[in-house]
Image (cartoon, grey):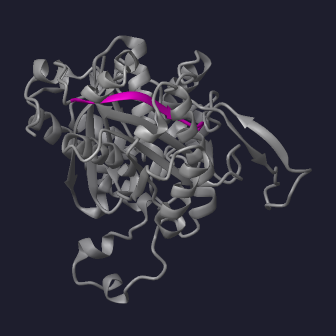
Amino acid sequence: MALPKGLSAILAKSSSDTVILSSLRTPICRSYRGQLKDAYPEELLSVVLRATLDANPNLPPESINDVAVGVVLSELGGSKAARMAMNHVGFPSSTSLYTVNRACSSSLQGIATISAQIRGEMIGVGIAAGMESMTRNYGSKAIPVDLWPELKKSDVKDARDCIMAMGLTSENVAQRYKVGRKEQDEFAVESHRRAAHAQAQGFFDDEIVPVHTRFQEVDKQGNKVGDEKQVEVRKDDGIRANATLEALAKLKPAFKEDGGSTAGNSSQVSDGAAATLLMRRSTAAELGLTSSILGKFVAATTVGCAPDEMGIGPALAIPKLLHQLGIEAKDVDRWEINEAFASQAIYCVRELGLEAEWEQGKVNPDGGAVALGHPLGATGARMTATLMHGLGRSGGEVGVVSMCVGTGMGMAGLFVRE
């Protein structure tokens, strides 16, 4: 099926549209010390899948044909645990499930893939979700430990660079494209300020599903403090409302002795899950769910780049997507560009010519991954939830979600709020 061309075509409603009926997420919490550190990724997935059913009480669970779960770090690709979690919370065995791993864009890829299945009439209704517990599964820092030795000593630099530490790719972007340490710290402070304001105003409340789980406090050495507790987690816990430029300036470089990327201006290692319910517009009408439509997914694209500067991905993917759809940046009301590192986020904003939009609060108006966190497999669906609810509050129509992708890629997706 051909993509719509031009803004009017994108905004027009068609019976073949892939519409969104709900887009929800758990709180995103700091790995190792945050409120979700003792939860399992599939436990978090079960929460958002059950919440999706509860948010759509007039949708029979058996009408959901397929579920795509973005996950990067889980054992066996997360497929068995995810399927178990889905069945555990009330989905019938007739609903199928698969997992998706395109690193940081995994759950945005899930949205694109479920949409493609809907457009190709393979299914009528699907869920694109994501889950990640970096607390439990980030021991290798997302670098394979059992790798064909020939690849580590490959004559092809791009092959070797696929396992370069992400922090070093951030330093490459900063050095090559002249993004200074102070700029990175200023960006990080603003990300926290925006996220803290959004949290205080209750902007995230409609997209967040509370998680009931257990929590064991530990000291800095990892020793247990007190007894394990049952907790209800309702808010993102990585936001620092009191972040200051002075405090961030004191932090040492995290990846390179003379570098500019620190723990304070890089995305947080996080735990969380998210899920978006999609279906064909005609199916929504048949099920009497037209009034529940939040908006629609229009299209997505991917692009490759050098692995040692993977952070530039959005600056390549977004222009490609806009060109494919025949629109311009001025047609977009809200941008969610993942803040893997302040260095690459700043570069992408500059390269895309979105400096004014950043200042006006059209780019990451409620903060980004520096403040909210980056649970790899769940990030795309998390950003989609934030985008769709944010457009609903502002009255905007067109939004873009984009992120860089480890090993050298970028992905971007375009959505419409109705």
The correct choice, above or below, for 88 with respect to 255 in the image is above
Left-right relation of 46 to 39: left
Closer to the camera, 41 or 170? 41
The count of marks equals: 0
Residue 108 part of the magenta-drawn span: no
Left-right relation of 60 to 18: right
The residue most toward the bottom is: 150
Closer to the camera, 281 or 379? 281
Residue 20 part of the magenta-drawn span: yes
The residue positioned 37% from the left and 86% from the top of the image is: 148
The correct choice, above or below, for 123 with respect to 194 in the image is below
Left-right relation of 202 to 280: right
Q: Examine the image and state in which quarter residue 32 appears.
A: bottom right
Closer to the camera, 97 or 128? 97
Q: x%, y% of residue 295?
A: 32, 23
Q: What stretch is highlighted in magenta?
A: 17-27
The residue positioned 59% from the left and 67% from the top of the image is: 139
Closer to the camera, 136 or 140? 136
